[in-house]
Amino acid sequence: MSLTPIHKRLILIFLISIFGIDNTFSIHDPKMEGGKAAAMANTSVTLTDIWSIYHNQAGLAYLENISVGVFHQSGYIKEQNMQGISFALPTKTGTIAASYSYYGFSQYNEMQAGLAFGRAFSKYFAVGIQLNYLNTHITGNYGTANSINFEVGILSRPIENLFIGVHVYNPSRSKMGDEKIPTIFNLGVSYLFSEKVLFGVGTEKDLNHDPIFKAGIDYKIIDYVSLQAGISTNPTRYSFGIGFHYIKINAHIGFLNHQTLGYTPSFTLSYGF
């Protein structure tokens, strides 16, 4: 029996997930390795920009401008690509934000739409929460499944220039049909050595996998250009990237390395009104 191109693609993705070539492939794994986050090996739980809606919603509380952003994250094969869009609106009581992301291709895809709120109780402490609607579609007899889950984050600055972030994805341990959606804990610490240098370390723990340790650095060469680099474990992965900043436009491209498959790029573009 000959296989159609569709079935070949599904089998390839299945093999990638089973043999650990890409441990980011699972039902609604929330990793958005876009731009700056990917370049810093996903040491991103303490960052405060529009992309906090994917990494730690508490960071949204410190946004000062209405912001919009788009991202593209390449997989090892095109069927693993992810795209998305985000919007954030600061108010007197906190920042309201929304996001939409799409992973996969026509025969297998995952969609997530999120509504978030981040509030700062002082310049030293903020909390955030997000409600997600999830949808998975598999062609043929498998059909479509839906689910709802949430995520919560805390961001603290106990002393000047020191940031501590905690984030939990899917603490309710929601499922997509019979499939478990990952529950993932993130803890990170970063220190701003100067206006130009930010260094961070962190750990990530999926309840079903060994912990990942990671470190990343962000260095602003000049006002318009910054460089990022990072390293993470389990397996060992290296990353680097570059950011461009002009008035209220921020663009980042990051490259994350896999020992076997090489580098994959991620791109983010945002604008603050």
Image (tube, rainbow, N blue to C red):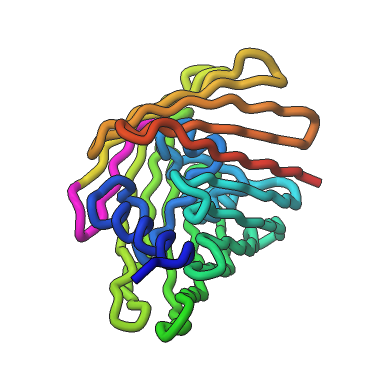
Viewer-nearest residue: 71 or 272: 71
Q: Is residue 208 left or right of residue 266?
A: left
- The answer to whether residue 27 is above or below residue 231 is below
Residue at horizontal 27%, vertical 31%? 236
Q: Position of residue 6 (x, y in %)?
A: 47, 66
Q: Position of residue 183 (x, y in %)?
A: 30, 63
Residue at horizontal 32%, vertical 52%? 16
Magenta-colored span: 200-210
Q: Is residue 266 magenta?
A: no
Residue at horizontal 40%, vertical 34%? 41
Residue at horizontal 61%, vertical 63%? 100
* Residue 212: quadrant of the picture: top left
* The N terminus, quarter of image: bottom left
**Does the image show residue 263?**
yes
Q: Is residue 74 left or right of residue 268?
A: left
Viewer-nearest residue: 171 or 105: 105
Viewer-nearest residue: 172 or 162: 172
Q: Count all numbered tags in the image, as a single digit.
A: 0
